[in-house]
């Protein structure tokens, strides 16, 4: 049987000291080991199939190298799982593992989930939600380094850092895309009443209109909900029995499921997308936005990026990386959404 490679073997192959190998593979190379040497160490470790002994590392550092993640329904929902995927990417790259518990929208289970993870000596905690929302932070999260992803502390003086999408800019960029195509009459199916994200996207829509020197028609903004049938009925109210001169030339939707409903309504009425009506979604939901016919132009929510940013913030706090002291930094990180242009939007029709 071949002998298992050691840190000394990695050091010899990379031409560095054993302490340099330890620093790099334990996530403390930046500022201590030159970038070129770090690259050689990682390559040597990969070639030798070497990884640090997790138990020995935990004993030396008095850390478990485990991060607990609690979600409201991310695990059991088809949405927003990429937040956890992005967080796990960063954790694994820095020698940590993640343990995930889902409360299935039962807030009464939050405290017990946190306590269960704390009993297992996790080094830090992350709370992840489906959709942007305020959170009554479980008290146990204040006992270890913790971070919020896609949610924010509902208390008047937030105590935890949160990482959320930049919804205002997302709404503005979506509207500006349609304005640049010549649309001036753009309706907005803005989501559900009570959603924290919905008014932010409406604000972005209004900002884009104001920047273009245009007025917003109040009847063009509808809090429609989130589902396909809501998009269908919302579009029918805007389009059915309305003359071409009076109907909107584009409909923006607060998510991609609403956009499906709009497309179904357009088909019912014999309208061609985008020749007669441009349709804009939001989320870039997998196997929906890119497979629609025509494929849907949409704003991509940066879910994986949110997870990565939140985990990076958390691990930097745990490992004492310079500049992560909460007294010195903001409690908020906003991650930009990304415009994905496909075939459902085009120049405004002449009328």
Image (cartoon, helix red, strand yellow):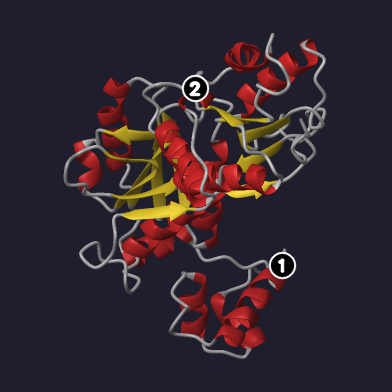
Q: Is residue 344 visible?
A: yes
Check disc 2 and report its element: helix, strand or loop: helix
Q: Residue furthest left?
A: 156
Q: Which of 238 and 1 lies nearest the eye of the viewer?
A: 238
The residue that disc 1 covers is 2
Residue 324: x percent and y percent? 31, 66
Q: Nearer the viewer, mark 1 or mark 2?
A: 2
Q: Which of 308 and 167 lies nearest the eye of the viewer?
A: 167
- The quadrant of the picture occupied by the C terminus is top right
Left or right, 133 with respect to 6, comes to left
Closer to the N terminus: mark 1 or mark 2?
1
Q: Residue at x 45, y 21 (%)?
A: 192
Check disc 1 and report its element: helix, strand or loop: loop
Residue 207: x percent and y percent? 46, 46
The residue that disc 2 covers is 219
Residue 339: x percent and y percent? 64, 48
Q: Residue at x 71, y 14 (%)?
A: 265
């Amino acid at each position: 049987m071949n002998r298992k490679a050691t840190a000394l073997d990695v050091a010899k192959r990379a031409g560095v000291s054993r302490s340099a190998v330890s620093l790099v593979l334990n996530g403390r190379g930046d500022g201590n080991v030159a970038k070129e040497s770090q690259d050689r160490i990682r390559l040597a470790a990969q070639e030798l199939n070497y990884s640090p002994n997790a138990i020995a590392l935990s004993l030396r550092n008095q850390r478990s190298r485990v991060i607990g993640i609690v979600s409201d329904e991310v695990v059991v929902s088809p949405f927003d799982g990429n937040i956890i995927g992005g967080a796990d990417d960063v954790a694994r790259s820095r020698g940590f593992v993640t343990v995930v518990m889902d409360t299935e929208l039962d807030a009464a289970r939050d405290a017990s989930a946190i306590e269960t993870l704390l009993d297992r000596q996790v080094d830090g905690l992350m709370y992840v939600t489906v959709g942007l929302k305020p959170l009554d932070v479980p008290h146990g999260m204040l006992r270890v380094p913790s971070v919020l992803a896609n949610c924010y502390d509902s208390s008047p003086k937030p105590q935890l850092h949160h990482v959320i999408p930049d919804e205002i800019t997302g709404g503005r960029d979506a509207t500006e895309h349609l304005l640049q195509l010549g649309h001036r009459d753009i309706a907005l199916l803005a989501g559900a009443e009570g959603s924290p994200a919905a008014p932010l996207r409406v604000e972005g829509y209004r900002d884009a209109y104001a920047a273009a020197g245009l007025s917003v028609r109040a009847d063009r903004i509808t809090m429609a909900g989130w589902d396909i049938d809501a998009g269908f009925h919302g579009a029918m109210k805007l389009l059915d029995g309305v003359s071409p001169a009076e109907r909107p030339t584009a409909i923006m939707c607060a998510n991609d499921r609403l956009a499906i409903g709009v497309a179904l309504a357009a088909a019912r009425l014999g309208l061609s997308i985008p020749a007669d009506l441009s349709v804009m979604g939001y989320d870039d939901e997998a196997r929906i936005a890119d497979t629609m016919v025509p494929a849907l132009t949409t704003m991509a929510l940066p879910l994986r990026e949110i997870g990565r940013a939140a985990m990076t913030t958390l691990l930097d706090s745990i490992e004492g990386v310079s500049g992560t002291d909460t007294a010195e930094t903001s409690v908020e990180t906003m991650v930009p959404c990304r415009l994905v242009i496909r075939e459902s939007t085009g120049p405004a029709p002449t009328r």
